């Protein structure tokens, strides 16, 4: 368990510039990144005991975050025409 919030640019340092570009140019990517950020903040609050939550709900949030992260990674690494 980490008490440092995840950040897309920190999770994918090789794609930091592309993350910024896609947030500005791709509405779907920007929406997914914002959802990732929101869920990530909530997980961080749970991890730091600022927001009590039962284990099942916390695990569900972590799964949602992982799915979003996978989807964001797929968008980051897709080839552009």
Image: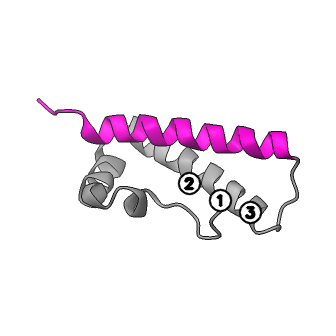
| Circle 3: element type | helix
| Circle 1: element type | helix
Residue at x 65%, y 59% (from the top left corner): 41
For the C terminus, the quadrant is top left
For the N terminus, the quadrant is bottom right
Disc 1 marks which residue?
41
Q: Nearer the viewer, residue 3 or 37?
A: 3
Residue 65 on the magenta span: yes
Up-down relation of residue 30 to residue 3 (above or below): above
Could you tell whether 5 is left or right of 81 in the image? right
Disc 2 marks which residue?
37
Magenta: main secondary structure equals: helix
* Circles 2, 1 touching at the beta carbon (< 8 Å): yes
| Circle 2: element type | helix
What colour scheme was applied to this rendering of the protein? one colour
- Closer to viewer: mark 1 or mark 3: 3
């Amino acid at each position: 368990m980490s008490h440092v919030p995840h950040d897309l640019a920190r999770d994918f340092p090789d794609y930091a510039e592309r993350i910024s570009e896609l947030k500005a140019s791709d509405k779907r990517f920007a929406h997914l990144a914002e959802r990732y950020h929101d869920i990530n903040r909530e997980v961080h609050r749970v991890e730091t005991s600022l927001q009590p939550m039962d284990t099942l709900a916390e695990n569900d949030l972590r799964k949602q975050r992982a799915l979003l992260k996978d989807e964001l990674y797929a968008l980051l690494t897709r080839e552009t025409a």
